[in-house]
Amino acid sequence: MGRKNWKISAKAALTSVCAVLLCFSAYAQGSWSDYAAARNTVWEEKLQKQVGFLADSLCQGRGIGTRGGVEAAAWIAREFEKTRLMKMDSTWFKSFITEKGIVGHNVLGMLPGAPDAKTYVIVGAHFDHIGLLHGKHYPGADANASGTVAMTTIARMMSAMRLATGRRNPSNLIFVGFDGKEADMSGSAALWDMIRDGRLTDPVTGKVITPKQISLMVNIDQIGATLSPLRSDRPDYIIMLGNNRLRPSKRDILDYCNKNFRTHLHLGYDYYGSEQFTTIFYRLSDQRIFIDNGIPSVLFTSGITMKTNKTYDNAASLDYSILRKRILLMFHWIEKML
């Protein structure tokens, strides 16, 4: 290799190293004390109590258009209010009608970012489930009371950190409880229609939120089980689909957070090693409409299990110590993505 080419190669290598170091320096902003207020809001007993409420017979399996579904939506709204999120257009609820004429209710709340924040990150989870079928109650603890509780908990953590540190995020956070996932993902489609048609406004500025301002969509669906581990000796796992759709500089953040915030979960970036099933499952939940419209989107899940959509998918069947770790990891990852 000539001296000139050697210099060019060395310069390129140095530039790459500097870029990586700058990237990881950005990740590392924030100390353990900054996160203490957020992490201290998450404990296993509370998670189990909240999943238990949503999976209780009072919520009747949370079928769309049912009294139990409305009960679950009201619970999310109460959590958003306690978390000090802001209502979107002066209400927590955004109602829609499915193709079969059933009325559903998405629940939205926003945590404003810095005064100059122009982008929005959506963090969502569907709260609806099968409901009552042939007189049988389908609790849906994992599917998807677990994801709903994870979403509201992350909202609470973000708000607690902001109150403790006074620091505002570079992006606005919109938290969504989706109704109608079991009705052809009609709730997420209805939200996208609102954004596309200019019918969703920022509660701080009063300006219309445009599709181009949505920088990321994070969906959480079935996050509480340990019955389908990626390895038989590691029930403490989490699957993230869509990481390869993010900018290359963002693809190592989950690994970074898992190590540096000591959750030490076994990470999977595909669906059990199958390219075909990864493609299928990446589009089987409420992130699909955002994917179809070019929005960077990820799905966090613990996978389908033998209890999915069964009458024995109850609150007692989940592992809350591992659910807590998953929530902590998702919180830190989202915070670093803002």
Image (spheres, rainbow, N blue to C red):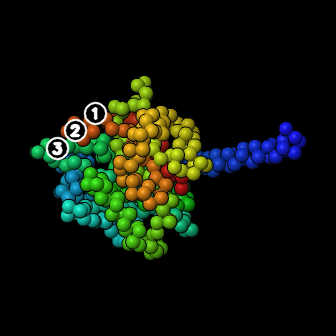
Residue 128, percent from left and from top: 26, 52
Q: Which residue is mark 3?
A: 137
Q: Is residue 7 left or right of residue 15?
A: right
Residue 38, percent from left and from top: 47, 49
Quadrant of the rendering where the N terminus is positioned: top right
Q: Is residue 125 left or right of residue 13?
A: left
Vertical placement of residue 235 versus 152, above or below: above
Say what amino acid the circle numbered 2 marks.
Lys
Q: Which mark is residue 338?
A: none
Q: Is residue 54 left or right of residue 8?
A: left
Q: Which residue is mark 2?
A: 310
Whole-angstrom CA distance, mark 1 to mark 2, is 8 Å
Q: Which residue is mark 1?
A: 306
Residue 202, percent from left and from top: 44, 70
Determine crowd level at label 1: few under 14, some 14-19, many 20+ residues with C-alpha closer than 10 A.
Answer: few
Vertical placement of residue 329 versus 289, above or below: above
Whole-angstrom CA distance, mark 2 to mark 3, is 9 Å
Do we see residue 134 in this rendering? yes
Which is more N-terminal, label 3 or label 1? 3
